[in-house]
Image (tube, coloured by chain):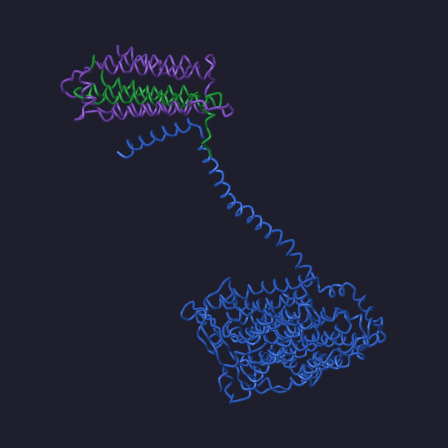
Amino acid sequence: MFYLFAGIILICSLLSITTRRILRAAVYLLCVLLATSGLYFMLNYQFMAAVQLTLYAGGIVVLIIFSILLTHHITHRFKHPNITKLLMGIGAGSIGIGLALVTILSHSFKATTNPELPVDMTVIGTQLLSTEKNGYVLPFELISILLLASMIAAIVIAKKEKNKNTEI
Amino acid sequence: MTGYTYTVFIILIPLVVFLITGLLGMKWKPIVSGVIGTIGMGISWTLSLITAGSYFFSGNHAEGFQTILPVETTWLRFTDTLHINMGILLDPISVMMLVVVTTISFMVHLYSLGYMKGETGFARFYAFLSLFTFSMLGLVIATNIFQMYIFWELVGVSSFLLIGFYYQKPSAVAASKKAFIVTRFADLGFLIGILILSFVTGTFDFGKLTEPGTAIFGSAASMSFLGISALTWAMTLIFIGGAGKSAMFPLHIWLPDAMEGPTPVSALIHAATMVVAGVFLVARMFPVIHFQAPAAQEIIGYVGGFTSLFAAVIAITQYDIKRVLAFSTLSQLGYMMLALGVSGYGGEEGLGYMASMFHLFTHAMFKALLFLGAGSIIHAVHSNNMYDMGGLRKYLPITHITFLIACLTIAGVPFLSGFFSKDEILVAALNHNKLLFAIEFLVAGLTAFYMFRLYFCVFWGKEDRHYHHTPHESPLVMTIPLMFLAVASIFAGYIPFHHLVTSDKIGFASEMNYMVAVPSVLIGLFGIAMAWILYKKESEVPAKLAKSWGILYTATYNKFYFDEIYLFVTRKIIFNYISRPIAWFDRHVIDAFMVGIGLTTEKISYQIKGMQSGQLQHYAFMFVAGTLALALSMIYFLM
Amino acid sequence: MIQGIPLEHFLIVSTIMFFIGVCGFIIRRNLITMLMATELILNSVNINFVVFNRYLYPDQLQGQFFSLFIVGIAAAEASVAIALIINIYRKMQNIEVENVNELKF
């Protein structure tokens, strides 16, 4: 099961960055996100998986598709990328992969023997809003402010300029 | 003996006059600078006469004259024994030179008031004259050889400024450049000689170097280079420096061209003072040369003899008045050098030394007289060419008489000073080296011949020559120096030099050697007679004689083509093979290196500038690459 | 060991996903596709947090919550980015990333 999800993730992400049609890139991204949430389901983090599906797959990908439709000819195909950029990207990527994998695989991760905490909504809810140790009310509030700010920013940035010649 | 500290004024007054006339002369009328210069020089002259009087003629000198140092300060100290001082040294030759330099300079200052009247640059002329006098005086009273070198160079510079006085004329500029370069080249030898000498002996001081029986040369005996001892090298090189200034062969080429300067300059510099600096140097270093480097002394003798013969032969054919006199100066300088070359040391042996100094003194008087007289003639006729003149004795009486006296003196007619001094040289040569004696004997005859050729062509010759405007006698300010110098030429021979100026500073008795005197007078009279026959009346005979000598005449007339040889060597060889490659190297390697640094920096910075491309993805790549590099280095190289 | 899959395999997947995202960011010429690559990066980090939480600290919830916040921030950032892209499109009529290069020497 895991290997299926892993395979989908890897193949779709590769396709997403190399395809020449933009809408297909968005769809491949959607597949990646779906597979990721499948991974979360596998790990028994249902809440996380649900959030992933709702926000990422449902919100962000839709947003991206809207913006594609606003700014593009859908049938427009991309040109091949610059050879310099190609080399730069592949170089950075491969070296990074090599370095990270070598580091990770040479480290032995020790699992604990603590009992597993059952994760369900009540636990998550109380933790999210508690003020004691391991409580996350502060980041919760901060993120809500951040979301407000970004909403206002998006509206302001994307506003159409008033036409100077219109009669008042 | 009263302190001689007033002698410092003798040298300082010309310096002050130079500064005043040089810096402020433009503000006043020109005559003011002339008067200031002349008065200053007059004061120096008086002081030097007083010095000579009290040095030579007061006190008991049975044991010889003492060397007095009224002033001395240490200037640069290299080691405990090796230091360069600045001071004043008074001993017989330097006091004698003080008199010579100040007298001739004063006469020239006076004369120039008339000769240079109306010229542009009058104030500048007097400023340079004072600078020159200051440098020459500094040279003669130098206490050590390095101080002498410093003033030597100053004299070179002043003569450069004076020869090139008419700087608008290209020939004058070329002549001054030539003079400076030739003497500078000789000074290279001088400097190397000084360095070798000071290295070997550890001192620059004249007193220590010339002390009789001194032991500082002990270490020198074992040093040698290429089989010639170190001291011979040193003395020969120092002589080369002197030979440059005194225009000995083959460094004589600058002196005839230096006649481009105004005539008073020729009188001062090239007759009486600067050119004898070389002779003075050899005389100063005489004990060292005689005892430590006898080979060098032989060279000096032969060079002097050859130069005098060479110059006399060329003088026979020249027709520019000043050139004849220039070659005559060369010839007489050869006499002086030769006398030093054949001299011994001490008492009767040192006859050559004394004769050389005596001849220097008398020669200064009559040669300056000849040049100033020539200046008077040129002033009247406005031409230098002997063939343009004739019958001038009717128009220029005073000049005529004084010029005649000078010509008789140089020819060695008895009872005039030239006879006494030249005779002593001939005796000294006879006692030492028969070949040199024969050369000098011949030259005496040639001297008489060419001087009287000059005299007859100018004052007799073509009697009814038409001049553009009637020549008139020079003003009094120009004739007074002529008369004074004529009197000096006559009576200077009676000064008892053998009591005053000798090689070891102790006087000796000497008497006339009739075996030498009579033949030398006869050959002089023979020369005069030849000139009388050929030139007194205008005739075709000289021209026919010249044609019959043919190629020899042409070669002599062109000064044996030495100037052309030198030009060839410098232009074709030195310029092309040495200067051009060096210039190429300088421009293309050294400059290119510097320019290359600049260009490389510019290129590198251009490349770095390209990193700020504005492209977002380049920045992202740099970010990732930097992080990876940091991580790599932290994990693998620091842990 | 969830279902017998060792921790390292999850990490390999997330690492490769991360660097594919980096590659995509650098290679792509279009601003929107660059944004998609950025989402890939963020997702890979998410997987990392969750997996560590599950395998190494099963009694705590920090990994999950952090992932939650990452998702929220990713949403906010994506919306602002799209607003910017729309603005750029209005100015230049296309959204090649090479045209956005005013901040150079």
Residue sitting nearer the eye, B502 or A39: A39
Q: Is residue B288 above or below residue B639?
A: below
Chain A representation colour: purple
**Which image quadrant is residue B552 in?**
bottom right
Q: x%, y% of residue B169?
A: 70, 62
Q: x%, y% of residue B222?
A: 45, 67
Who's the residue at 47% across and 76% down the image? B72
Residue B468 at least partly seen: yes
**Which image quadrant is residue B304 in?**
bottom right
Residue sitting nearer the eye, B502 or B2: B2
State which quarter of the image contains the N terminus of chain A: top left
Q: x%, y% of residue B35?
A: 64, 77
Chain B representation colour: blue
Q: x%, y% of residue A57?
A: 33, 14
Chain C representation colour: green
Q: Say whether residue B311 is left or right of residue A121.
A: right
